[in-house]
Image (cartoon, helix red, strand yellow):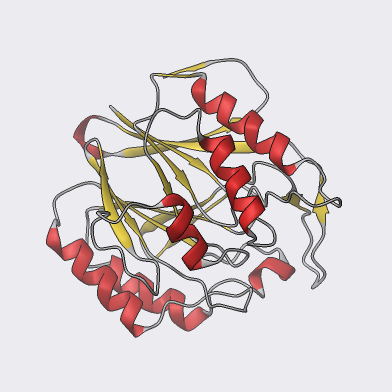
Amino acid sequence: MTVLAQLSDPHVDVGPGDTGSAEALAAAVEAVLRVDPAPDAVLLSGDLTNLSDARSYERVRELLAPLPMPVHVLPGNHDDREALRAWFTDDDVAGLHRDPFHYLVRCGVLRLVVCDTTVPGRDDGRLDAGALAWLSDALAAEPDVPTIVAMHHTPLLTGIGAMDAIGLPEADREALALVLSRFRCVRRVVGGHVHRACFGLLGRCPVFACPSTHLQVALSSGSELSLEIAPPSFALHVVLAGGEVVTLVQPVRSGALSL
């Protein structure tokens, strides 16, 4: 059994206006350490910091240090690609691009394919022709290995108006669906950005948005973004016998979880 833990959107901020983001990420790390068996790897699916400043990235790295397993990061719209590369990646990560931030790694029997959806200076995301071509080539390289595709902007409409307005555009979601339809190895597309646990389908491929380790987005169809204090959670993607994947959502402040 392979287990990939997913944390998302901690928005760590070391400034005077912070609302407990660092403490929330520390609690999430402690919760991951209580999972039995221990996850094979951890994915942090974007918006590691709120202001993409060096002090905040340094604090995130300190908070993640207790995790003994590999930690794989990807950029969110609040992140800086070069800062992520400097603070969190090794030079030998397979296929790591300088710009955009694409790469792939193995996690036990699972392959994790990371696809950058960020556009510097913007909150909404894109998957342009170059990103889709890279993804297609990456999936074609090992078409029989169970695969999770990870990105920050979850390719779903959620009904939360403010988040849907800054997600992936419809044309990009449709183009991604066409790519995924060619590869049965993709068991899940996972993302963040939404600050809510959301599930849906893109074509026939299951899609999951991970909740935040800190604040969640309020449920509203309006255009104004509102955050609320709701239970922080993280996800566990478990590869079962035969290569199927089940996704569990685990509250941070609870007891040990045995799989």
Residue 26 versus residue 14: which sits nearer the camera?
14
Quadrant position of residue 251 = top right
Q: Quadrant of the C terminus?
A: top left
- 58 left or right of 69? right
Which residue is rendered at x = 68% and y = 49% of the image?
Answer: 12
Quadrant position of residue 249 = top right
The percent position of residue 169, horizontal first and vertical second, equals 53, 79
Q: Is residue 232 in view?
A: no
- 70 left or right of 136? right
Quadrant position of residue 232 = top right
Q: Residue furthest right?
A: 17
The percent position of residue 27, horizontal first and vertical second, equals 65, 29
Residue 138 versus residue 14: which sits nearer the camera?
14
Residue 223 versus residue 15: which sits nearer the camera?
15
Which residue is rendered at x = 34% and y = 31% of the image?
Answer: 40
Residue 171 versus residue 101: which sits nearer the camera?
101
Above or below — where is 120 with respect to 236?
Answer: below
- 254 left or right of 20? left
Above or below — where is 139 with respect to 198?
Answer: below
The percent position of residue 158, horizontal first and vertical second, equals 62, 62
Q: Quadrant of the N terminus?
A: top left
Q: Is residue 226 in view?
A: yes
The percent position of residue 216, horizontal first and vertical second, equals 73, 49
Which residue is rendered at x = 62% and y = 78% of the image?
Answer: 122
Which residue is rendered at x = 67% and y = 64% of the image?
Answer: 159
